Amino acid sequence: MLAQHLDDGDEVVLSTTHRGPAPGMSHPLLQRLAADGGLEVRAKLGWTDVAFFSEHGVPAVNLGPGEPTLAHSAESGWSGRRWSPATRRSTACWLRASEPLLGGSRRARGV
């Protein structure tokens, strides 16, 4: 689409102006998730959908198994078998607490 408007040597640079989001810890479900799991809460590095939601006042978080500075690198490998007890507890708590917001039990919805 742009090619017809560019001359040899022209350069197109795409960038984003989104800030990394602050953790959306004002929501009671997110507070409970962190507290019950003993999870460390810190700002996200870079832009994700969480930044979009955060800019629009929707509490959101990213959950990840490792060091954010290694995300999407060769050193970021992780196996689901390595879920920590805290992660398991937090996930179970989150699912139970979310049921009323999602319109009933997971079992009734076939999840």
Image (cartoon, helix red, strand yellow):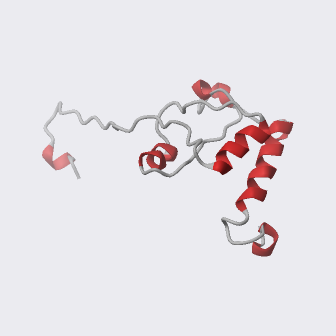
Quadrant location of the C terminus in the rendered image: bottom right
Q: Residue at x 48, y 37 (%)?
A: 21
The vertical placement of 63 against 93, above or below, is above
For the residue pair 17 and 93, the one nearer the viewer reads as 93
- Quadrant of residue 23 in the image? top right
Q: Position of residue 95 (x, y in %)?
A: 75, 56
Q: How many marks?
A: 0
- Quadrant of residue 8 in the image? top left
Q: Residue at x 67, y 50 (%)?
A: 29
Outermost residue to the bottom: 108
Q: Residue at x 78, y 69 (%)?
A: 105
- Quadrant of residue 65 in the image? top right
Q: From the viewer's perspective, is 33 left or right of 73?
A: right
Q: Position of residue 38 (x, y in %)?
A: 77, 34
For the residue pair 65 and 24, the one nearer the viewer reads as 24
Q: Residue at x 44, y 47 (%)?
A: 52
Q: Position of residue 101 (x, y in %)?
A: 66, 65
The vertical placement of 17 against 101, above or below, is above
Q: From the viewer's perspective, is 75 left or right of 35?
A: left
For the residue pair 71 and 109, the one nearer the viewer reads as 109
The vertical placement of 91 against 42, above or below, is below
